Amino acid sequence: QVQLVESGGGLVQPGGSLRLSCAASGFTFSSYAMRWYRQAPGKERALVARIGGTGGSTNYADSVKGRFAISRDNAKNTVYLQMNDLKPEDTAVYYCYVDIGVVATIAYWGQGTQVTVSS
């Protein structure tokens, strides 16, 4: 079965960095785009970044452009989110996401990892 397991969250001071990882299993990893979402308290879940199956195309939310970088290692079935110059407004639970299928797709989410940016 499909599994997405995030790690790397924690408490960091403003201006600091974290790298999140999402280990995937149960599907042909390199065939699918991967996404990172985040959900802050009292807010809806929002897309942060997306990466194509080969890693050649990436997209970012305007709020993180120039600070975050999404990447993937298809040999390790892992997608990463490097977060630099973190701000208090980046505080959220970060989720890994994939949707799988051709005609009908099924969405899969990881359990989430908490990122807290505070002094």
Image (cartoon, helix red, strand yellow):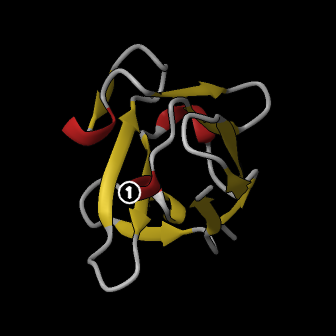
Residue beneath label 1, please? 89
Left or right relative to 102: residue 110:
right
Label 1: few (<14), some (14–19) or many (≥20) C-alpha neighbours in 10 Å: few
User: x, y percentage for residue 3?
Assistant: 69, 65
For the C terminus, the image quarter is bottom right
Above or below — where is 13 with respect to 10? above
Q: In the depicted view, which residue is nearer to us: 92 or 107? A: 92
Q: Residue at x 53, y 61 (%)?
A: 94
Which residue is situated farthest in the front direction here? Answer: 119
User: x, y percentage for residue 25?
Assistant: 73, 54
Q: Residue at x 42, y 27 (%)?
A: 67
Left or right relative to 19: residue 45:
left
Residue 69 seen in the current view: yes
Residue 100 seen in the current view: no
User: x, y percentage for residue 15?
Assistant: 55, 34
Q: In the depicted view, which residue is nearer to us: 109 or 81? A: 81
Q: In the rendered image, which quarter is residue 118 located in? A: bottom right
User: x, y percentage for residue 69?
Assistant: 48, 26
Amino acid marked by disc 1:
Glu
Left or right relative to 10: residue 43:
left
Secondary structure beneath label 1: helix
Which residue is situated farthest in the top direction here? Answer: 56
Q: Residue at x 60, y 62 (%)?
A: 116
For the N terminus, the image quarter is bottom right
Q: In the rendered image, which quarter is residue 40 located in? A: bottom left
Above or below — where is 117 with respect to 65? below
Left or right relative to 105: residue 22:
right
Q: In the depicted view, which residue is nearer to us: 114 or 25? A: 114
Q: In the rendered image, which quarter is residue 30 located in? A: top right
Which residue is situated farthest in the bottom direction here? Answer: 42
Q: How many marks?
A: 1
